[in-house]
Image (cartoon, rainbow, N blue to C red):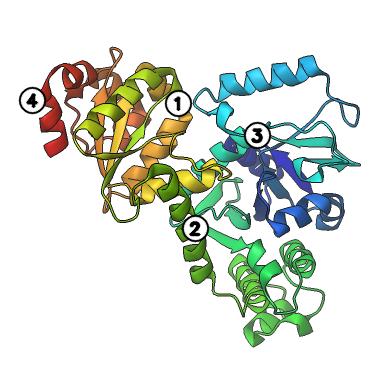
Amino acid sequence: MGCPINSIKELENGLRYRKQKMVVVILASANSDSRATDFVLRNFHEMDMLSDDVDFYLPGYGINQYNKTPIPETTINWIREDSKRLFPDFHYNHIRSIFNYDCENDIARCIDSPRLGRIVFNVAEFTDFVLEFTRRIDGFHYLGGCQMVLLRSTYEGIPNYNEARVYDLDNIINSQSGLSLDSFLFRTFQAIRNGSFETTRHFRNPLLRKLFTHNKLSKSAIIHEIDDLYNEATRYHDTERYYNFIVQNIIIDMNRRLHWNISEEDFYFISYSSRNVMQAETLKRLFQDNNIHVWIAPDGIPQGREYPLVIPTALKLAKIFVLLLTPDSAKSQWVRRELAIAIGNSVNTKVKVILSEGFTVSDIRNDNELEFLLDRVQVKYEYSDLIHSSDMLNSFISE
């Protein structure tokens, strides 16, 4: 059953309610030119029917209460303002509209489902979900196309992110193996629903045939069989090479926008709340005046590139992660996502914190998540000191 969702919390609530042992999450940005995304959006109704009691979640999509009637302009404005309230740090002026008013002319922006009605895409919610996935799933990289994530869950319905399996659906479409995306998804749903495919003869692995015969097919065995399916579908496709190709193209686009080489030169990544944009821009200029390259959103986002693809790439390459910590940024889920990713990349990236707007070390200690994330980070610099004292600024840079 297809389940449009707008957050990780909604996914976890669904798992607790349904208590399924395994579910599928499909990351499909309606703003991308992915052929696999196009397939999923165009065939949502068929997938919704054939998946039956196997849930597949579609992050970043929500049900429009007006169904197939045109969305009133006043409602569109209200939804957009509400999204800005929920995601104040998302740079709406640098993205295309998150709503589509005419699905017949632009099917990639919304879905018409006979069961659910009209489903619309929200790029801010999608980006938030992808960044949270990046934080929770070790080694996960969003490739900007269409990816399927297979999640196990406990008996209590709690997802096990440590054992998540990720499959790039664009690899299947671009492969010449002969196994279609249609067939891969259909047989994946069957495997999860029945613990097997239609008959034992579908199993290439003799152990799986034996397990099926005794009706004791485990979650691991199901995953192994889906892995086999994916390997068959992509046997002529080098996934690692494909990922590197995508990243290299993003880097080329960023280099053109920044006018310096982001992959070869050290740079600062500034993480901040857009409510503190003037302070962030001031820090950017101070660092640049000291011959330091700076990456900051939205300036560092190449035209036509998506946030959930560019930001993790910039974070991975950053030598220094600078957190402008204010009451606003402390409440920002975007900033926390970026901080968590930077902390996870501590081998390559050093985290530095600048306090501002009255935010103190005591405030950090009173916030369990921030205290945990910044446990090994020395916090001693304040924004006002850095902009008024060249000695303090030099000390910050030299550390």
Q: Tell me the amino acid under the disc marked 1.
A: Ser
The residue singled out by tag 2 in the image is 249
**Picture quarter with the C terminus:** top left
Q: Secondary structure at mark 4?
A: helix
State the CA–CA distance, disc 2 to disc 3: 21 Å
226 in relation to 139, above or below = below
Q: Tell me the amino acid under the disc marked 4.
A: Asp
Q: Which mark is residue 391?
A: 4
| N-terminal label among 2 and 3 | 3
| N-terminal label among 4 and 3 | 3
| N-terminal label among 4 and 1 | 1
| N-terminal label among 1 and 3 | 3
The residue singled out by tag 3 in the image is 96
The residue singled out by tag 1 in the image is 332
Residue beneath the point at 23% across and 21% down: 361
Answer whether residue 217 is visible to the viewer in this image.
Answer: no
